[in-house]
Image (spheres, rainbow, N blue to C red):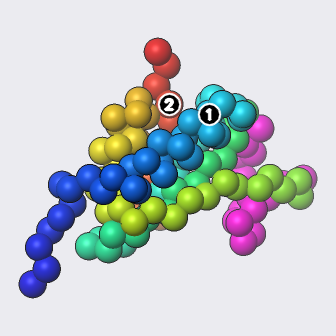
């Protein structure tokens, strides 16, 4: 039986996350929405950033793009981390984000938004 290491914080993954958040916060919409999903017990989670200011209500995923009703696609910025989803949840809170499950019960990914200062 493998030991649960979800309380350990990997240095390289945490640094990659910090750089990802600072890079996208500096050049993009600060009200961007971040989503992440990871399998239970697996130390690999993918976090993606989407601009929120023009986010359509009805959207569908097409590969790595999000497409609205008008068919305009926006590139998502994603990063794969060697980190448990519980670690990523805690790290996002440490960086000032509020993360929760979406209101749609069929969705299982976490949605994170930067808290106002």
Answer whether residue 61 is magenta in the image.
yes
Does the residue at mark 2 contact the one at mark 1 (Cβ under 8 Å)?
yes
Q: Is residue 55 located in the magenta-colored stretch of the structure? A: yes
In the image, residue 26 sits, relative to residue 60, either above or below, namely above
Numbered tag placed on residue 25 in the rendering = 1
Disc 2 crowd rating (10 Å Cα; few below 14, some 14-19, many 20+) is: some
Which quadrant would the N terminus be assigned to in this image?
bottom left
* Mark 2 or mark 1: whose residue is earlier in sequence: 1
Q: Which mark is residue 10?
A: none
Residue lying farthest to the front in this orientation: 12
Position of residue 106 measured from the top left corner of the image (x, y, whole percent): 47, 64
Residue 88 percent location from the top left of the image: 36, 52
| Residue at the top extreme of this rendering | 117
Q: Is residue 1 among the parts visible in the rendering?
A: yes
Query: Residue at 40% of width from left, 34% of height from top?
Result: 95
- At mark 2, the secondary structure is strand
Image spot of residue 55 (x, y percent): 72, 42
- Label 1: which secondary element: helix
Q: Residue at x 34, y 35 (%)?
A: 94
Q: Examine the rendering and report whether any part of residue 105 can be seen.
A: no
| Disc 2: which residue | 114
Q: Which residues are magenta?
A: 54-70
Residue at mark 2 to residue at mark 1: CA–CA distance: 10 Å
Question: Are there few (<14), some (14-19), or many (20+) residues within 10 Å of tag 1?
Answer: some
| Residue 18, position as x, y percentages in the image | 47, 42
Q: Quarter of the image holding residue 54?
A: top right
Residue shown at 77% from the left, 55% from the top = 75
Q: Tell me which secondary structure the magenta stretch mostly adopts.
A: loop
From the image, state whether disc 2 or disc 1 is nearer to you. 1
């Amino acid at each position: 039986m493998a030991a649960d290491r979800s309380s350990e914080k990997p240095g390289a993954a945490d640094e990659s996350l910090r750089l990802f958040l600072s890079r996208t916060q500096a050049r993009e919409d600060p009200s961007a929405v971040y989503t992440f999903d990871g399998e239970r017990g697996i130390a690999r989670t993918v976090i993606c950033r989407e601009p929120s200011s023009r986010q359509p209500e009805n959207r569908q995923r097409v590969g790595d793009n999000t497409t609205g009703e008008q068919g305009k696609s926006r590139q998502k910025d994603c990063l794969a981390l060697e980190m448990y989803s519980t670690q990523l949840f805690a790290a996002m809170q440490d960086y000032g984000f509020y993360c929760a499950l979406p209101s749609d019960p069929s969705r299982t990914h976490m949605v994170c938004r930067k808290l106002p200062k």
